[in-house]
Amino acid sequence: MREEIWVEKYRPMKLEDVFGQEETIERLKSYVVSSNLPHLMFTGPPGVGKTASAVSIAREMFGESWSENFTELNASDERGIDIVRNKIKTFAKTAPIGGASFKIIFLDEADALTSDAQSALRRTMERYSSNCRFILSCNYSSKIIEPIQSRCAIYRFKSLSDDAVSKRLQYIAGAEGLTITDDGLSALVYVSGGDMRKAVNSLQAAAFIQKDITAETIYKITATASPEDILNLISTALSGKFKEARNMLNSLVFDQGLSADDVLNQIYRSLFKLELSDDEMIRLIDAVGETDFRVTEGANEKIQLEALIAHFALLRQK
């Protein structure tokens, strides 16, 4: 049981198994019923069912011959024009197999394609539309050129709700004979951030350590600080105790091995749980955004995080 790949084992195989996207799935089912398909674009955060939906459409449309009429390419692996000229065009040229009316090319992370590659893809979509349909998946539709967007029916996948993630994790835990405490389940939902793939990966990693899953285990294996520690850090800084807050920050970053990105993301999420005035919230979010930009640009993480804590400590003194 422990040796099987859970993420693949519990991947939805049919559209009705894709949860948390009910409205979108109902619309996609109509294509399967009609046995026809336009070019599609799936956009949304990672781990919400975009790839699973594309594979499910192919499975339900083509039956046993689905793998011969479906190919999946990841644009982040090969971003240039060659992937369009070679792999995509070669597959699009060949005729469908098993009596299918068309083939499907699923291009994952399509927003990673260069502008030249997208321009070539636009022409390919137009030229081979009679025997090939394209499904593009991306996190940011704004990075896809307008001519491609206008050729696709766009479906926006939303982040999964905490309730949807919780129910799925409880189902997997029951099927695998695992016990999850209430705080362990809350921790899994917290670290997932609406990403089901991350939630299942975290559960699987914790299961290798012990069958009784607790919050402490989840935070340890995912290199995540507990929300209480982050809230305590922010509260201490806002009370003006800079040195104490700095020691707590160093404990999180160095003792627990968290990256600046992880700490900033958790600080941002925790701000909305504090009772702050609008003016204070605006100033703090602005400071977090500025720090995030500087870290992304390559500034020293330790200095930037300490500067952020100093900004918090100065806020109420001013």
Image (cartoon, grey):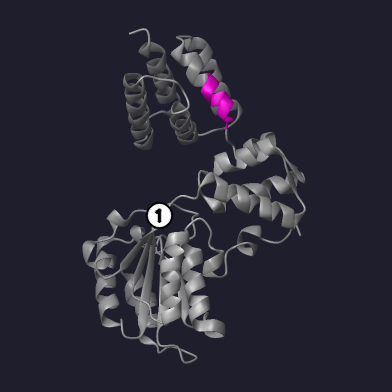
Q: Nearer the viewer, residue 15 or 137?
A: 15
| Magenta-drawn segment | 225-232
Which part of the image, by quadrant, shows the C terminus?
Answer: top left
In the picture provided, is 118 more to the left or to the right than 159? left
Q: Position of residue 78 (x, y in %)?
A: 39, 64
Q: Residue 272 location, x and y as percent?
A: 44, 28
Residue 303, placed above or below residue 15:
above
For residue 284, above or below residue 22: above
**Residue hosting label 1:** 44
Corner quadrant of residue 9: bottom right
Residue located 56% across and 39% down the image: 190
Q: Amino acid at mark 1?
A: Gly
Mark 1 element type: loop
Question: Does 170 appear in magenta?
Answer: no
Q: Is residue 231 magenta?
A: yes
Residue at the image position 49 percent from the left and 55 percent from the top:
48
